[in-house]
Amino acid sequence: MSRSATVQALVRRTHEQRVLAVLRERGAMSRAQIAARVGLSRTTLSEITAELIARGAVVVARTDLDLRQGSGRPAELLALDPGAGQFVGVDLGHSRVRVMIADAAHEVIAAGVQQYDASTPWPGRQDAGFGLLDRVAAEHGLHFGALQGVAVGVAGPDASIRHQVRAAFAERFGAPVLVDNNTRFAALAEAMSDDEGAAADLAYVRVSEGIGGGLVIGGRLVPGGRGGAGEFGHVRVVEDGHDCRCGKRGCLETVASIGALLAEARRHGARVTDGQGLRDAVAANDPAATAAIDRAADLLGRVLADAALMLSPACVVIGGELPVLAPYVVDRIAAIIATELEAVGTGLPTVRAALLGDEDGARGAIAALYHSSPLLAEYDLASVADEPADAEPWRARA
Ligand SMILES: [Zn+2]
């Protein structure tokens, strides 16, 4: 989209939002009343209301025939469609899609999840998302007439996949579409749901099959200049370590991902084949399993301590499978961060396990949309939407 087209779209969206806000506040009104209240010409307002009616966001509630005396054609009164959804968050993972629809008051009004096989190609995953949104909307009597935007969190693809996903959702919904990494969206969701209120500065790492993460600084999700902020998984922690799928050796992911933990525990004699087995082994104090997890937690703690020294987050959050199957890692990591930071005297971040479950990506996607809405906050939509074409294809899976 060209710069001027982007500006035009933003101006139009701002007008639409003002009309919707007035109707939300005041209830049914005639076009003349709306025009007077929002300060638009009758012509501009007619165009905007025609578009909103065509999309189903606004309905003709009734005429003012019963309110007026005398003759003349009765004026139509317009009102918000009470059943219209506003913000859609989608988390397109490798084996499931999760969707969430929220209104402008930040209330989640519908949500759903649909599994698919991990071998499903991206167009099939998108279609599963479209179908799920249709079903969820129908169940709740919603249509997407008042749609302000769709944010899609995508697991691990290269930039071309993201462009394809963005194009498909934009074509399907005819609304602004924001695409980012689903783990980064999860970081934003964790920041928004912090116990102490929204955390303005937070470092999030997710440890599951892969290791990814996200940074929230000054209340904003940080995509980074090249769209790769928060890739904790590919910090090198072992010189001449195992090969990593990114092409380097000894990345954090090669020692702390669930697959790496299973391999390490087995090498030392633990009979574990999956996460549940590892969890049972940890609960039974199996020395091989706990030794593997201790080592991983120590290396993870060092990486997070380095991040904390550089960024001074108020909060460090550990998500994904690791803190679920070995909850003690949170305290162990907190102790390492404390050791590394206390001597420097910069103060310590809170260290906690993630509060949200699998819905974190969809929830964070909606939060990013709220940030991008011109009525809600200034947010550089372009910096997230127009990411560079060479973003890393090996981005951590989730
Ligand atoms: Zn790597």
Image: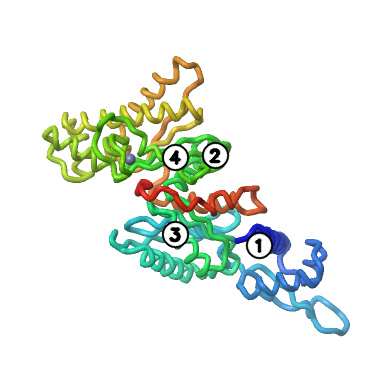
Query: Where is ligand 1, by quadrant?
Result: top left
Q: Between disc 4 and disc 2, whose residue precedes?
A: 2
Please tell me how crowded label 1 is: few (under 14), some (14-19), or many (20+) other residues with Cα within 10 Å.
few
Please tell me how crowded label 2 is: few (under 14), some (14-19), or many (20+) other residues with Cα within 10 Å.
some
Q: Are marks 3 and 2 in contact (CB under 8 Å)?
A: no
Distance from disc 1 to disc 2, alpha carbons, whole Å, reads: 34 Å
Residue linked to disc 4: 230
Distance from disc 4 to disc 2, alpha carbons, whole Å, reads: 19 Å
- Identify the mark at residue 325; answer none if there is no mark: none
Q: Quadrant of residue 62?
A: bottom right
- Give the residue displayed 77% in from the left and 71% down from the top: 31
Amino acid type indicated by mark 1: Ala
For mark 4, give the secondary structure: loop
For mark 1, give the secondary structure: helix
Closer to the eye: label 1 or 2: 1
Closer to the eye: label 3 or 4: 4
Residue linked to disc 2: 198
Out of 172 and 101, give the one closest to the viewer. Answer: 172
Q: Between disc 3 and disc 2, whose residue precedes?
A: 3
Q: Are marks 1 and 2 in contact (CB under 8 Å)?
A: no
The number of numbered badges drawn on the structure is: 4
Out of 256 and 77, give the one closest to the viewer. Answer: 256
Distance from disc 3 to disc 4, alpha carbons, whole Å, reads: 24 Å
For mark 3, give the secondary structure: strand
Closer to the eye: label 1 or 4: 1
Colour scheme of this structure image? rainbow
Amino acid type indicated by mark 2: Ala
Q: Is mark 4 within 8 Å of ligand 1?
A: no
Q: Between disc 3 and disc 4, whose residue precedes?
A: 3
Amino acid type indicated by mark 4: Gly
